[in-house]
Each structure stands twice: as C-alpha cells, then as structure tokens.
Image (cartoon, rainbow, N blue to C red):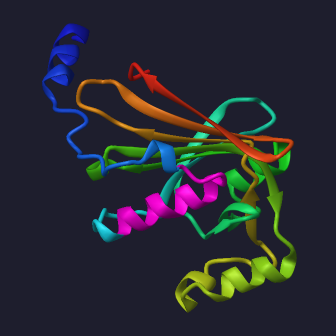
Amino acid sequence: MTDDVRRHLAQIPALTGTAPSLDLDGLPDDPMALFLTWLDQAVDAEVAEPRTMTLATAGADGLPDARMLILKDAGERGFAFASTASSRKGAQVSENPAAALNFWWQPQARAVRVQGPVVEADAAESAADLAARSPEAQSLVAEGDWRLWWVRPERIEFWQGSPDRKHLRIVYTPDDAGWRHDIGRADGS
C-alpha cells in the first residue's frame, strides 16, 4: 500500500502558486513590516483566508499539537490569537508558554513561520476581543474564560517557493540593535 500511496502523492502537483516579485536589497529592518506587506499582498491578490494560521503548542508532556486559528492582531507586540483558557490550547499555553505560527498563502507560494514565547494579554484587552465577536460566538464562552495571547517572536522566517525547488528563506532573529536577517536558498526541506 505504501508504494501505491507514494506514487499517487508524487502525481499530485505541488507548488502551483506564483510568487510575487521580491526585492532582496530592499528588505525592511523590522520583520513586522515585511509580514504586513506580505499579508497585504495576499489580501490584494484575494488569497482565501489570508489571516488564517496554524498555531502549534505543546503541553507539559512535550507533544506538539497544531490547529487553525485567526490572527487577531500583529505589530510591535507580536502576533495575537484568542481562545478560551479552558480549551486544550489554553491549558497547553499555561503549561508551556511558547508557540509556533505558520501562515500559508498557496496562490503566492509563500509562507511565514513564527516562533516565540506566549504572553497573556490583560483582562481588559481579552474582554475587548471577546466583545468584538458576534453575540452568538460570545454566548458560547463562559464568563471570564476568554483570553487573548501574544506570541512574541524570537524567530520569523519568510519562505518563498520556487518551482525549481530553490526556495528562498529570509530569517529574522533579534539582536542588540533590533533585528538581523539572513537570506538563503533552501532545498525544500
């Protein structure tokens, strides 16, 4: 069965998107500026669900767990997501306050990966986020259970795919002056 599956998978097209042009000499010093540019380009190109991301967490057992969520905010403080504290993700963030995010904009053959510690927003900010949800969605949340969290990035990778598999990776990491970035080609791994 494995050989049949492998052959079948090999016949399914991959990296069918077309990456927008990218000026490597004009990269911003701040990765958030590049993220917002890429997000705007995805919105302008009418990429479906451009603010949907995979959130990966791990609890005390160390086993990774991933699910799809909506990006609530992005900026100087990092990347925000929300859910209930009583959820599995809420328990995992409480036990192990670190996360990874992944954005995938297939039509543009682009992805953004984020890693960092998770910090809970204050109660007023969480309440404001809940109040912005529909009344129907609010009614599903027990009083005091809604949380907004911020992933404070310690690494942000911008990945742009290429049909020849010479994918581009731009990795931002913090340094004493703010952020530094490294540019490299990747073999698809």
* Outermost residue to the front: 25
In the rendered image, residue 61, in percent from the top left (x then y), is placed at 77, 30
Q: Residue at x 74, y 60 (%)?
A: 150
Q: Can residue 49 be spotted in the picture?
A: no
Q: Using the image as rendered, state which of residue 134 and residue 162 is in the foreground.
A: 162
Q: Is residue 7 magenta?
A: no
Q: Using the image as rendered, state which of residue 53 and residue 92 is in the foreground.
A: 53
Q: Is residue 40 magenta?
A: yes
Check the image and report above or below for 118 versus 6: below
Check the image and report above or below for 17 versus 30: above
Q: Residue at x 32, y 70 (%)?
A: 44
Q: Quadrant of residue 143?
A: bottom right
Q: Can residue 111 be spotted in the picture?
A: yes
In the rendered image, residue 53, in percent from the top left (x then y), is placed at 50, 54
In the image, the segment drawn in magenta is 27-43
Q: Using the image as rendered, state which of residue 37 and residue 74 is in the foreground.
A: 37
Q: Residue at x 54, y 56 (%)?
A: 34
